[in-house]
Amino acid sequence: MTFFTYLSLPAVQHALIAATLVAIACGTIGPFVIMRGMSFAVHGTSELAFTGAAAGLLIANDAVSGALTGALVVALLIGLLGNTERERDSSIGVILAAGLGLGVLLLSFYQGFASAATNILFGDIFGVSVGQIALLVSIAAASLLVMSWIYRPLLFASVDHVVAQAMGVPLRIVGLIFLFLLALTVTEAAQIVGTLLVLSLAISPSAAAVRWTARPRTLIIISVILALIAADGGLLLSLIAPVLKPSVCITGISFCIYIIARYITPHHARKLSAPQEERA
Amino acid sequence: MEHPIVATNATLTYGDRTLWRNLNFDLPAGSFLAVLGPNGSGKTSLLRSLLGLQALSSGTLSILGASPRKGNPHIGYIPQQRGFDRDLPIRGRDLVSLGLNGHRFGWHRFSLHDRIALDTVIAAVGAERYADSPIGLLSGGEQQRLRVAQAILGSPELLLCDEPLLSLDIAHQHEIVRLINAQRKEQNATIVFVTHEINPILPYVDLVLYFANGQWKLGTPDDIFQDEVLTELFHTDVHVIRDGGRIAIVSQQSDINDEAGGHHQHGTPSEREADK
């Protein structure tokens, strides 16, 4: 089969749509994940999507809605247990360990074919159904809408929480809303690239974009573009070179983008010439 | 005209620890109040109460004619200088603009009027040259200027400052105080200035509120910086040394300004000093 016959297949088209939606959602939250130092929260919620998926399989024979519900529960737990950044990290560690154990237990009770749960570990990009795309679209749209609604208080709380609080930003509520968005987005992404590789879309593109701009809005746009390049580019690459799995191509491209950003940094030039001392 | 801050028997206690009891004062509009006291004596808690972040144990505070509430747009707030991460993706200008509507949810169009207001405050603090640089790359003095710009962006009637000079060198301290005082002169803003160090602000201060040992004294700098007054407040011999417009406070205790105000006795339940 040639590249273009691949593109005419519904499974491939669905995969491209799904990758695009996931990249947009991940690219949008990524800059705030970086500003708030929440990479570990991304990792924790994504791995726990596995537990949610196992629970969903056992209870309703539906891994996806199980994973989404599980993500919200996990976000709530992280939000309630962790007040400070350090406390949050340790509580994520605790929840992650307990949750994965629970996931293994749940899976051992499940009589059916467990691949729907294990798929979520590595992703199943060519198995996206029309129904799942509808779900992805609604999650991405809701996430964009809420993100634009909380954008300013979230930015304020993320860069300067002391003044933000003094000015009346409800830090806990803003933090919790963001955690919910993060959990939904990450779980959505886990369907595509797998929980183990979510960071390649939720962190790497934004980490690269930070090297290139200090304007918050521009940062989000660049981060979305880089996530799109990694997700769709990786998918297309895997069609051209079928020996490579899509998730390998996606993580590979995303890593390369980050490495390039580390070394080609226009921002860096500004750093060196930035005024260090103001006249008295 | 209504006094911007009216405290009536305002009391704040944590368990059996009294930070301040029966605080009574009316602060006239356009005054510059310095709040002094050892660590843990309740200076920052007073600011938090004024901001509506800390409820009183008893008594009332009235801010600009109403009870304290979160997100009051008539209040500006300037915190201590703390470094920003070098790679924090935000420019000085973006930080300042958060002072305009950073606390508001929803979709806001940044109008031409807003842009002019933003440019005006950035120019007022002399930060045009570096306002477009990432905030984490600026010096402490530059960052504090931008924080002043952020706080005065909405032309607040009340400016609350929580040790904004900490860790700045003397030249920058004077510059920041001058900018804060300009807001008082030009807009008749009222300044509440929490500090460890009175000297950089002494030329501008009208009133001093001194906390120690669960008690307080309020008066003009000349009233407060007297051996007897501070000796009574600290329950230990205190000497005030004046030298060419500067004040030094010395005592038997190694450093009275850094004494933790944890242990205290309060014989006199309330003291009302000459205010107004």
Image (spheres, coloured by chain):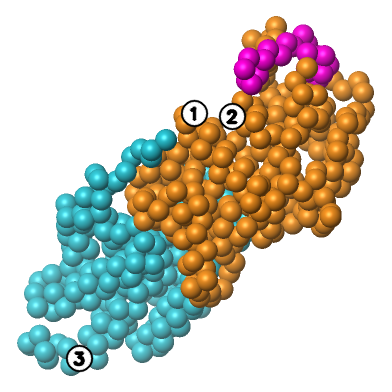
Chain colours: A cyan, B orange
Q: CA distance from mark 2 to mark 1?
A: 8 Å
Same-chain check, marks 2 and 1? yes
Q: Which residue is mark 3?
A: A9
Q: Which residue is mark 1?
A: B170
Residue sitting at x 60%, y 46%: B182
Between marks 1 and 3 in the image, the one whose residue lies nearer the viewer: 1
Inspect the image, locate mark 2, and give the three-letter code of the amino acid beneath it: Pro
Q: Nearer the viewer, residue A26 or A196?
A: A26
> Can you tell which quarter of the image residue A153 is in?
bottom right
**Chain letter of disc 1?**
B
Q: In what element is the residue under mark 3?
A: loop
- Tags 2 and 1 in contact by the CB under 8 Å rule? yes
Q: Which residue is mark 2?
A: B200
Residue B77: image location, x then y, percent: 62, 49
Does the image show residue A96?
no
Inspect the image, locate mark 3, and give the three-letter code of the amino acid beneath it: Leu
**Chain letter of disc 2?**
B
In the image, residue B247 lies in the stretch drawn in magenta: yes
Q: CA distance from mark 1 to mark 3?
A: 70 Å
Say if A178 sits above or below A61 in the image.
above
Q: In what element is the residue under mark 2?
A: loop
Say if A183 sits above or below B53 in the image.
below
- Tags 1 and 3 in contact by the CB under 8 Å rule? no
Magenta part of the protein: which range? B227-248
Same-chain check, marks 1 and 3? no
Residue A188: image location, x then y, percent: 40, 73
Residue sitting at x 22%, y 85%: A12
> Can you tell which quarter of the image residue A170 is in?
bottom right
What is the crowding at mark 3: few (fewer than 14 residues within 10 Å), some, or many (at least 20)? few
